[in-house]
Image (cartoon, rainbow, N blue to C red):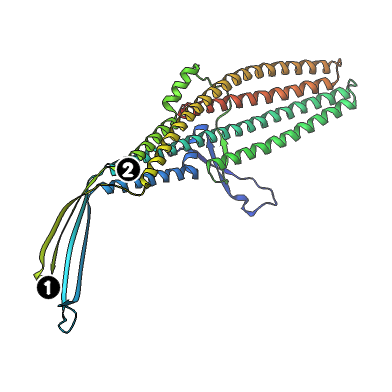
């Protein structure tokens, strides 16, 4: 899948003592969540490897089909021979040398072999299994990249929150300095504001480092070059998810979840493999024929031919066939057990995603209310400090709660959007994001 992304050239800023390539420019890559998930599919080595397995499975199917089609071959040769005649003793003679030429074409056709037919059907099912396996890998990786994208958005939101903290602390420091000049505050109030400002600046540096690392992780997950200026165009926000009951969600998963389709095909593959081995007990019919020219001189060569029909009846092979039949039956039972486990796992993932989605939606609402209250508390404490009825320690405490409230909203939005991705993955509907 080709994903359109917007590229533009942005000057790269270097320090005076940096590399002489200061005039170089790096491309800016703008990615939305959908574009990041789709771009990762074409770049990831694991996904490409599974695509190659599909090609390999198709080649296996073609090989099995070749066993059912006519097999035509030919030979051509010439020789010079001496022939022994008579009996050993004094009368023995050797005649020759004589030239001998032969050109012959051979045709072989399996008229009926249920075992070969079932092997071909199993090989075709193997192609479907490989294709679905590649699709599962692709969807898993898309979901993983989506979560990494959200982690980068969370890190960016944390930087914004820390910048807001720095700006607020700068304002509080200015207010404390003005109150000290007016004789309404002490040096302790100013020093406390300076300490709080430096702490917020330190937290900003940490947040910026986390943001840059999160972008590197996203670039690595997608498989892009690190020499890009990555810009994320989406933001974490509350996006409505249609309400659905557990039954409805499970019904969607049963219809769209690729793992269920994959496991059904694996069961069919095991069943066809068992049938192909069991069918080896039955007789098979093969038609053979050849036609050619033979003679001592090429111009005088004569036509000869041979046509025959062979029936092969298995009688006893030392018990190896029965052993392979028993092994194939065990594989059928194993796939049936895996089917039950996949059904259980899909149900668990859907229920867990819906539970997390509902809880995180409530957490966002609580976090938003908590931020409103924290901002109100901060405003009141600043007024109390401005009129001299409280120290800036009360303001500092209020500001700490504002910072915590901002972090709570970031985490709640991250969980909410992460649960959206997990629910879409659990239902096999990532394209709905």
In three-dimensional space, the C-alpha distance between marks 1 and 2, rounded to whole angstroms, equals 47 Å
Q: Is residue 250 above or below residue 293?
A: above
Residue 28: image location, x then y, percent:
55, 41
Element assignment for label 1: loop
Would you call the spot at circle 2 few (<14 residues within 10 Å), some (14-19), or many (20 or more)? Answer: many
Q: Which residue occupies 29% across, 44% down?
A: 116
Q: Is residue 306 above or below residue 384?
A: below
Q: Residues within 10 Å of mark 1 (few under 14, many from 20)?
A: some
Tag in front: 1 or 2: 2
Q: Quadrant of residue 216?
A: top right
The residue carrying mark 2 is 119
> Where is residue 392 drawn, in percent x and y?
84, 22
> Dot 2: what SS?
helix
Question: Looking at the figure, which quarter contains the N terminus?
Answer: top left
Give the tally of numbered discs.
2
Name the residue furthest front. 89
Instruction: State left or right for residue 307 relative to residue 377.
Output: left
N-terminal of the two: label 1 or label 2? 2
- Front residue of this view, candidates 413 and 63: 63
User: Residue at the location (51% across, 37% down)?
Assistant: 141
**Residue in the foreground of this view, choosing between 372 and 273:** 273
Marks 1 and 2: CB-CB under 8 Å? Answer: no
Q: Is residue 399 left or right of residue 58?
A: right
x then y, percent, for residue 120: 31, 43
Circle 1 sits on which residue?
297
Q: Position of residue 344 (x, y in %)?
A: 50, 26
Residue 170 shown left or right of residue 63 in the figure? right
Query: Which of the numbered marks, if any, corresponds to residue 423?
Result: none
Q: Residue at x 34, y 38 (%)?
A: 272
């Amino acid at each position: 899948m080709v994903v359109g992304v917007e590229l533009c050239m942005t000057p790269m800023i270097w320090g005076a003592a940096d590399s002489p390539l200061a005039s170089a420019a790096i491309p800016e890559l703008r990615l939305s969540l959908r574009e990041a998930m789709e771009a990762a599919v074409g770049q990831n080595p694991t996904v490409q490897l599974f695509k190659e397995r599909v090609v390999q499975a198709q080649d296996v199917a073609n090989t099995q089909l070749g066993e059912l089609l006519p097999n035509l071959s030919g030979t051509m040769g010439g020789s010079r021979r001496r022939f022994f005649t008579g009996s050993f003793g004094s009368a023995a003679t050797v005649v020759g040398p004589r030239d001998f030429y032969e050109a012959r074409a051979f045709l072989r056709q399996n008229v009926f072999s249920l075992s070969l037919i079932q092997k071909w059907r199993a090989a075709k099912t193997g192609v479907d299994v490989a294709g679905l396996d590649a699709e599962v890998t692709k969807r898993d990786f898309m979901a993983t990249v989506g979560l990494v994208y959200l982690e980068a958005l969370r890190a960016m939101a944390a930087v914004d929150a820390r910048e807001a903290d720095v700006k607020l602390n700068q304002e509080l420091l200015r207010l404390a300095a003005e109150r000290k000049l007016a004789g309404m505050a002490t040096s302790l109030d100013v020093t406390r504001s300076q300490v709080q400002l430096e702490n917020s600046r330190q937290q900003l540096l940490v947040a910026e480092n986390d943001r840059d690392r999160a972008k590197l992780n996203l670039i690595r997950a997608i498989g892009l070059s690190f020499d890009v200026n990555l810009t994320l165009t989406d933001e974490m926000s509350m996006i409505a998810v249609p309400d659905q009951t557990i039954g409805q969600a499970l019904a969607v998963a049963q219809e769209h979840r690729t793992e269920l389709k994959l496991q059904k095909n694996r069961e069919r593959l095991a069943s066809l493999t068992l049938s192909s081995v069991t069918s080896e007990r039955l007789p098979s019919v093969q038609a053979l024929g050849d036609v050619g020219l033979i003679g001592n001189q090429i111009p005088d060569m004569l036509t000869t031919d041979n046509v025959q029909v062979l029936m092969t009846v298995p009688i006893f092979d030392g018990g190896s066939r029965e052993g392979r039949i028993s092994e194939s039956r065990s594989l059928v039972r194993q796939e049936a057990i895996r089917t039950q486990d996949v059904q259980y796992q899909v149900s668990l993932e859907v229920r867990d995603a819906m539970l997390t989605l509902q809880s995180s939606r409530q957490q966002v609402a609580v976090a938003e209310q908590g931020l409103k209250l924290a901002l109100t508390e901060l405003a009141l404490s600043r007024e109390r400090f401005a009129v001299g009825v409280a120290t800036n320690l009360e303001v500092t405490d209020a500001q700490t709660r504002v910072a915590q409230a901002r972090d709570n909203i970031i985490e709640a939005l991250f969980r909410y959007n992460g649960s959206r991705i997990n629910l879409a993955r659990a239902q096999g509907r990532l394209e709905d994001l």
